[in-house]
Amino acid sequence: MIPYFSFKGTDKSAIALEVFHTVESVPVHRHEFQEFVLITKGSCIHQFREISMPLIPGDVFLIPPHQEHSYVIETPVCMYNCQFYPEQIADWWDGQFGELLSDLAQPEVGNLISPADLNRHHIIHLSVSDAERVQSMMEIILHEQKEQGFAFEQVKQDYLNLILIVISRAQLRQFAALPGPDHSRREIITAAQKFIEENLTEHIDFSNYARMQNISPGHFRAIFKSATGLPPVEYLNRLRIVRAIEYLKDNKLSMSDISAAVGIYDANYFSRLFRKIIGYSPSEFRNQVHKMT
């Protein structure tokens, strides 16, 4: 029987926040509360509704009550975990944020899942500035939770509301619907994803690709981001880094071999990009993986 994890809160705010620096995988479980998670360092595989999705720093997602999920962690990961009961926060809360929670809790089904395709899990990938802003507000919640000064429960609720506003705005930017037939957009994006995966080791000029498809580069970037949650270049970089994570598990491959295998022919640039996205250098990541095996 799949266990229910208990709520960690001990005060009347209906919010509990924890920070995990962990190398331990989390088995399949569920809970009665809403939960959202922000990844700030490292990488892990989140398994939810029969979808396995690699998560990297900046990814934030919501798990609704009673839903089964788990984490496979292969290298140290840092994540902020916020548990909360919306119905206990305020009468107006559901009207303000209920639609956001509903949207984030309904991943698309029926299509193949790409390792870079956030839209299937309704993961929001925050910009660096938004991720830093959310993390700083979570730190304030943690401080209030620990110190329990005057009106600390109200402060926790207020900052949770601010965090969800930041996420809501990021979601609106990231998954904004565009005019035009859904079917034709889907075909364009599916073809582009296939092209990227088949040409991952090549230099890809997305402006040139768009023109070859008789689409303006600007329109192509807009519909690609709407469908996948990321601009084409960021999508490509994410896919390359996710692929590199798999190669780094093989100690026989050099960094130059790995960077070339994912289409980056400058090992120094590969190392900088990997650290920028994951928070560790490729060598640090590899060492951590092999310490755990």
Image: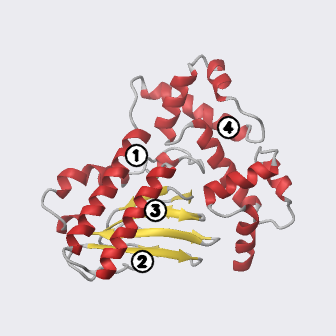
Name the mark nearer the viewer: 4 or 1: 1
Q: CA distance from mark 4 to mark 1?
A: 25 Å
- Reply above or below: 48 against 77: above
Name the mark nearer the viewer: 4 or 3: 3
The residue that disc 2 covers is: 2
| Identity, as a three-letter code, of the amino acid under mark 3 | Leu
The residue that disc 3 covers is: 38
- Reply above or below: 191 against 73: above
> Mark 2 or mark 1: which comes first in sequence?
2
Residue count near mark 3 (Cα–Cα under 10 Å), binned few <14, some 14–19, many ≥20 = many
The residue that disc 1 covers is: 170
Q: Give the colour scheme of this rendering.
A: secondary structure
Image spot of residue 271 (x, y percent):
74, 55
Q: Quadrant of residue 196?
A: top right
| Front-most of residues 84 and 133 | 133
| Identity, as a three-letter code, of the amino acid under mark 4 | Ile
At horizontal 56% and vertical 19% (from top left) the residue drawn is 216
What secondary structure is marked by label 3?
strand
Q: Is residue 158 left or right of residue 218?
A: left
What secondary structure is marked by label 1?
helix
